[in-house]
Image (tube, grey):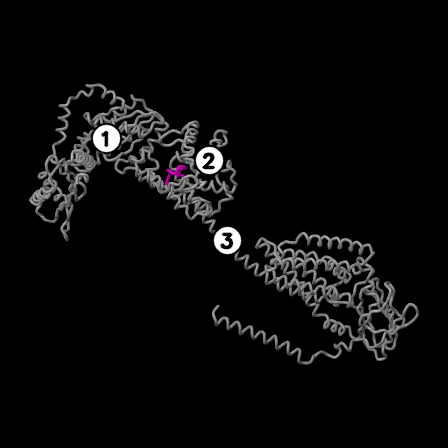
């Protein structure tokens, strides 16, 4: 709120205060405008009254007053009406008395409720009027008063005469304010109760104001019952009078409820005793009232004692709270209660010294207490609203975390579902971990958090390529390093998830070893979180007990032996002992993964999970598309290896390693389009070998084919048909006629290792290519032929001739980079072993600045550079095309000072062949073996 707004509001408050102050001052200073007939002096009866006693004596008495009259005895008062009497009514208030009016001995008016009251001995208090006229002037007026209670026996109230309307106006002036206060308290009491109930429904709690509302409701009933004007709006005053006494009897109960609620139920035991006494008193007094033995008013001292006892107990508990410092939380209510109790005690004590009270003290005390309680309730509501908002924020935060967790679990589940060997792995690990924790005596809450953490322990695998996760053969060091990184990735993904305890720590440390040789942090023993140690055992057990792409599931005996062998080294010995006990007693059994109850999943969570699943399905379909070679239509290496390895776990068959011979020659002579046609042809033929066969492009001119459920003879027929079909098909295309096929075959049994079978087939293929190509061999056939000395049918002369026919090249320029790399390693070994000095030279074709070049120019320049290199280097030197604009040369044992001359000869030759000058060749070199420096 800005300063101008504050000044505006302050001005408004000052204006309102001045208006109210002017009204109060004006009413106090200026004279009344009421008529004289409404003044008290004009309606009070001016005559004297004589008390005619039962012993025959008379006594002039003052009215109003109280005199010694026995209970049940009629008190007779007489007076002579003035000679100028013109009033149309004369009356006085009955205080639990029967009243009769006689004028000149004639009964003019009688008030007795014995036929209209439900119970009791006395008529209810009320104003009783007798109609008169000017004709009654000078006549004798006799009034008879009879009561059956000592409290009001002998009581004579003020006698009024005149117009009845003026009398009621006077009464209203005297007691109207208290009556209006009573109605206001009644209204506020009802509103307070309803408002408290509504607040309780909204905030799901009980508010102190409700009990205060009941106190106000009972107080307002008391005030209205004691009002001098109650007969104007209550048809049966006797019932209302009885209700006033019931309120007095029962008022300790809601009062104690209220105080007990304010004090946070610290003294409930004490208050319940007093409540029981008050309720018992109500039952007893009501019984006496109904039996006609004693009216409520006669037993009212007992009610007062109980009320005083109630106040005493409340006071004592207040003092105890003040001494303990616990009253600070309700100090405002405490002050209001003290004021209210003081007012009520004043009302109680005054009833013994004043004939009648209107309950104004009770009303004032209750209004003060209400005002204080409204302040406290508003503070509490503000606190609760603030707390509710904080809880709502916390709820939303936890809901977001829960959704994030569901997303992570969905991603993890979807990732596992991509491989049938890991499907359900996380669920099973979570169940096993929960069993171990339960056997170790963990609480349900701890087990719940552990299972949730175990469910996402492998979420870091999302960051690992499928080609590595599903690789059936042995991992390289680099691939294994990537696999190990899933622990760090998982911890990073889960680091902000607080809805599950220790989720990030479990994801990071479930591959730590008890002996400190694990990863990623090398933690040891108790340094590893206990949850991670449990998950490590459960994870390892599930891995051993389920079939994987590279092996069958282990037997239970093998698993138990593995666990026991690694007890204290890889695993926590206590956890291993616990889990082994579960396994040996048959308790480690889990049910199939159950779906979550629909009630536990919100629409938002369900929609989010569906969205993630659809995204993952789309990504999977796109990934599947990327897993196929666009040229041949066959799966790429990673996809094909996975598919074949999965089938090999279940079926026997034959693994064939197929290679297309002379593909490089086709590319070099006829271009890559011709080579692509040859590859497409082979891909098409491999796809058509058998409907159950699985083929993939392994890389370049190499392919893998698996023929399931076939014997050796069947495989031979299929391969012969493949080779024959390829030979006949290539004859239709002149440019690919030089292509041929070579294949190494290995027969497999269910459960055989893909890696071993692949190596056997690869070795067989190498043997085929070394012995003439254009045929296929089985692995065992190759072994047998190697054992036969003359089985090849070829002598060394034929081999040499075949090598010579393959081409004679200066500098081996036509080898591919893979072959060059192998030669490089060979030359490097020679350099280390025999101290040969070999140098690696890189020639780079740099373009001249500000020249626009076309493909024809580039190819022409590169051809010229190739010819120059061929012409300049020796036959012991090696060269290959490294990139689009670079060549690599290995110079064997040159003098380092001669390298520049060699390169100069190459460049001179190049410039002679290529005269356009738009390329400028450059070179750099290094010694191959640093050990020779």
Q: Which residues are magenta?
A: 510-519
Query: 411 above or below 172?
Result: above
> Would you identify the image quadrant in which residue 298 lies?
bottom right
> Would you identify the image quadrant in which residue 97 lies?
bottom right
Residue at the disc numbered 3: 392
**Foreground pick, 153 / 727:** 153
Residue at the disc numbered 1: 659
Query: 754 above or below 402?
Result: above
**How far apart are labels 1 and 3 at the CA level?**
67 Å
Front: mark 1 or 3: 3
Q: Position of residue 859 (x, y in %)?
A: 14, 43
**Tag 2 and tag 3, C-beta contact below 8 Å:** no
Query: 121 above or below 464?
Result: below
Circle on res. 916: none
**How far apart are labels 2 and 3 at the CA level?**
40 Å
**In this picture, residue 919 sits left or right of residue 329:** left
Residue at the disc numbered 2: 575
Residue 281 inside the magenta-drawn segment: no
Q: Callout 3: helix, strand or loop?
A: helix
Nearer-N-terminus badge (2/3): 3
């Amino acid at each position: 709120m800005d300063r101008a707004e504050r000044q505006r509001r302050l001005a408004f408050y000052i204006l309102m205060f001045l208006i109210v102050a002017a009204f109060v001052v004006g009413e106090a200073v200026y004279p009344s405008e009421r008529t004289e007939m409404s003044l008290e002096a004009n309606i009070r009866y001016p005559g004297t009254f004589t008390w005619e006693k039962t012993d025959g004596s008379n006594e002039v008495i003052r009215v109003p007053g109280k005199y010694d009259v026995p209970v049940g005895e009629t008190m007779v008062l007489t007076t002579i009406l003035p000679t100028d009497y013109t009033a149309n009514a004369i009356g006085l208030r009955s205080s639990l008395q029967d009243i009769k009016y006689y004028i000149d001995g004639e009964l003019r008016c009688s008030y007795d409720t014995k036929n209209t009251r439900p119970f009791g001995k006395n008529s209810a208090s009320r104003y009783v009027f007798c109609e008169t006229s000017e004709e009654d002037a000078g006549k004798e007026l006799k009034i008879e008063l009879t009561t059956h209670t000592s409290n009001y026996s002998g009581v004579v109230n003020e006698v009024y005469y005149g117009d009845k309307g003026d009398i009621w106006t006077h009464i209203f002036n005297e007691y109207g304010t208290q009556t209006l206060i009573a109605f206001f308290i009644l209204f506020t009491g009802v509103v307070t109760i309803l408002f408290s109930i509504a607040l309780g429904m909204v905030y799901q709690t009980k508010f102190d104001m409700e009990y205060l509302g009941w106190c106000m409701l009972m107080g307002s009933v008391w005030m209205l019952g004691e009002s001098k004007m109650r007969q104007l709006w209550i048809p049966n005053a006797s019932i209302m009078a009885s209700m006033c006494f019931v309120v007095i009897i029962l008022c300790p109960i809601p009062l104690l409820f209220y105080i007990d609620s304010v004090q946070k139920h610290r003294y409930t035991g004490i208050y319940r005793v007093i409540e029981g006494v008050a309720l018992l008193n109500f039952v007893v007094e009501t019984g006496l009232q109904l039996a006609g033995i004693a009216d409520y008013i006669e037993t009212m001292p007992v009610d007062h004692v109980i009320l005083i006892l109630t106040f005493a107990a409340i006071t004592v508990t207040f003092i105890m709270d003040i001494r303990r410092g616990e009253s600070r939380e309700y100090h405002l209510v405490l002050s209001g209660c003290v004021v209210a109790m003081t007012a009520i005690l004043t009302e109680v004590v005054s009833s013994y010294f004043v004939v009648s009270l209107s309950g104004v003290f009770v009303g004032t005390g209750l209004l003060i207490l209400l005002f204080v309680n409204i302040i406290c309730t508003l503070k509490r509501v503000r606190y609760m609203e603030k707390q509710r908002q904080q809880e709502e924020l916390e709820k939303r935060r936890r809901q977001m975390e829960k959704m994030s967790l569901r997303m992570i679990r969905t991603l993890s589940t979807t990732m596992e579902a991509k491989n049938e060997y890991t499907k359900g792995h996380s669920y099973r690990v979570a169940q096993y971990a929960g069993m171990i924790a339960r056997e170790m005596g963990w609480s349900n809450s701890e087990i719940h958090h552990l299972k949730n953490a175990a469910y996402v322990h492998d979420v870091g695998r999302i960051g690992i390529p499928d080609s590595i996760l599903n690789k059936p053969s042995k991992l390289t060091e680099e691939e294994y390093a990537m696999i190990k990184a899933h622990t760090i990735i998982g911890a990073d993904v889960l680091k902000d998830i607080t809805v599950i305890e220790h989720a990030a720590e479990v994801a990071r440390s479930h591959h730590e070893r008890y002996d400190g040789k694990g990863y990623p942090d090398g933690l040891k023993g108790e340094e590893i979180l206990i949850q991670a140690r449990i998950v490590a055992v459960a994870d390892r057990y599930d891995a051993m007990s389920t079939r994987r792409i590279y092996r069958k599931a282990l037997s239970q005996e093998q698993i138990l032996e593995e666990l026991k062998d690694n007890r204290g080294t890889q695993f926590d010995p206590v956890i291993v002992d616990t889990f082994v006990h579960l396994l040996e007693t048959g308790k480690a059994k889990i049910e199939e993964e159950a779906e979550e109850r629909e009630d536990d999943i919100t629409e938002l969570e369900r929609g989010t999970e569906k969205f993630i699943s659809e995204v993952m399905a789309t990504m999977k379909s796109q990934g599947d598309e990327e897993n196929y070679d666009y040229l041949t239509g066959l799966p790429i290496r990673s996809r094909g290896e996975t598919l074949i390895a999965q089938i090999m776990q279940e079926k026997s068959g034959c693994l064939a390693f197929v290679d297309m011979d002379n593909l490089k020659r086709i590319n070099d002579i006829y271009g890559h389009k011709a080579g692509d046609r040859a590859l497409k042809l082979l891909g098409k033929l491999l796809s058509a070998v058998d409907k159950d066969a699985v083929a993939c492009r392994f890389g370049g001119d190499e392919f893998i084919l698996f023929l399931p459920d076939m014997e050796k003879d069947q495989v031979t027929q299929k391969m012969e048909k493949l080779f024959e079909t390829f030979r006949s098909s290539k004859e239709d295309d002149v440019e690919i006629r030089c292509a041929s096929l070579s294949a190494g075959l290995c027969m497999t049994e269910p459960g055989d290792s893909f890696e071993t079978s692949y190596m056997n087939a690869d070795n067989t293929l190498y043997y085929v290519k070394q012995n003439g190509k254009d045929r296929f061999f089985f692995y065992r056939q190759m072994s047998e032929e190697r054992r036969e000395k003359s089985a090849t049918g070829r002598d060394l002369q034929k081999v040499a001739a075949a090598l010579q026919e393959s081409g004679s090249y200066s500098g081996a320029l036509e080898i591919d980079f893979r072959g060059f790399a192998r030669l490089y390693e060979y030359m490097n070994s020679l350099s280390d072993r025999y101290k040969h000095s070999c140098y690696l030279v890189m020639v780079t074709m740099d373009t001249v600045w500000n020249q626009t070049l076309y493909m024809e120019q580039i190819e022409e320049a590169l051809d010229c550079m190739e010819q120059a290199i061929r012409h300049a280097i020796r036959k012991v030197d090696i060269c290959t095309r490294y990139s689009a604009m670079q060549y690599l040369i290995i110079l064997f044992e040159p003098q380092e000072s001669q390298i520049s001359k060699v390169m100069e000869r190459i460049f001179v030759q190049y410039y002679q062949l290529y005269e356009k000058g738009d390329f400028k060749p450059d070179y750099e070199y290094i010694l191959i073996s640093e050990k020779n420096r």
